[in-house]
Image (spheres, grey):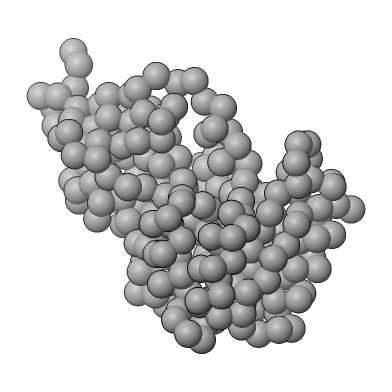
Amino acid sequence: MGTGTGTGTGPRRKVLVVEDDPTIAESIAARLRAEGFDVELAHDGPAGVASAAAHRPDLLVLDVMLPGFDGLEVCRRVQAARPVPVLMLTARDDETDLLVGLGVGADDYMTKPFSPRELTARVHALLRRVERAATTTEPVLVVGDLEVDSAQRRVRRGGVEAHLTPIEFELLAHLAARPRAVQPRERLLAEIWGWGEAAGTRTVDSHVKALRRKLGADLIRTVHGVGYALEIPTSEVPA
């Protein structure tokens, strides 16, 4: 049964679904409306960008393959105007496509065919993270030359600011709060993504690659078969 708000309390959340297949689009919209969300639909790239500007959704469900221009370009343009959580849908389970999607600002992805129940769970999890981040009162975290400002959602390394998506920020903040401590992929999935199973560990790997690309390949160390740790030079670690 829907909550009437999309998140449990407060105003109804708005979701924009950009999907060119009418059957899939209507199925997603019906499921989200049953969960209490207000849903807008767009069926091509230009319409998706225009609808995002007009309706200012709280979240986008965005297909990669669209007429006009593709979902990657939609994501790039929408994120340039206003950061918003994006769940991308793709018919191809391709690592390159996934990394490109994360690079232009997507927060999560699902490969078709997918379970409507899993999609709504992902939507709820993304919105919960945004709400949690909006109420944080944590001070600026400084680790070596890395600064993580949770209140302003800003990240700098060596004084240079980097633009991160909401999920990239959450992952970095989690690792930065525990420098050099190895965080297993399964724990990251549970604490950052809110998933209770380990089927999405590849999602963690892809977001780590995106962070390395934006902040430097030396920042996060891979512990093969286990997970990741934030790595800083010994000279920069407080005694």
- Outermost residue on the top side: it is 239
Using the image, determine if residue 149 lies above or below residue 116. Answer: above
Q: Using residue 219 as the reference point, say whether residue 54 is left or right of it.
A: right
The quarter of the displayed image where residue 177 is located:
top left
Residue 67: give x, y in percent of width and height. Answer: 51, 86
Residue in the picture at 75% in, 68% down? 29
The quarter of the displayed image where residue 18 is located:
bottom right
Q: Using residue 136 as the reference point, say whether residue 39 is left or right of it.
A: right
Q: Toward the viewer: 97 or 50?
A: 50
Q: Using residue 101 as the reference point, say whether residue 4 is left or right of it.
A: right
Residue 195: give x, y in percent of width and height. Answer: 61, 49
- Outermost residue on the front side: it is 54
Residue in the picture at 59% in, 54% down? 56
Q: Using residue 214 as the reference point, say whether residue 53 is left or right of it.
A: right
Q: Is residue 190 visible?
A: no
Residue 110: give x, y in percent of width and height. Answer: 57, 68
Q: Is residue 52 visible?
A: yes
- Outermost residue on the right side: it is 1
Q: Quadrant of the C terminus?
A: top left
Residue in the picture at 19% in, 39% down? 160
Residue in the picture at 56% in, 75% down? 47
Q: Toward the viewer: 55 or 171?
A: 55
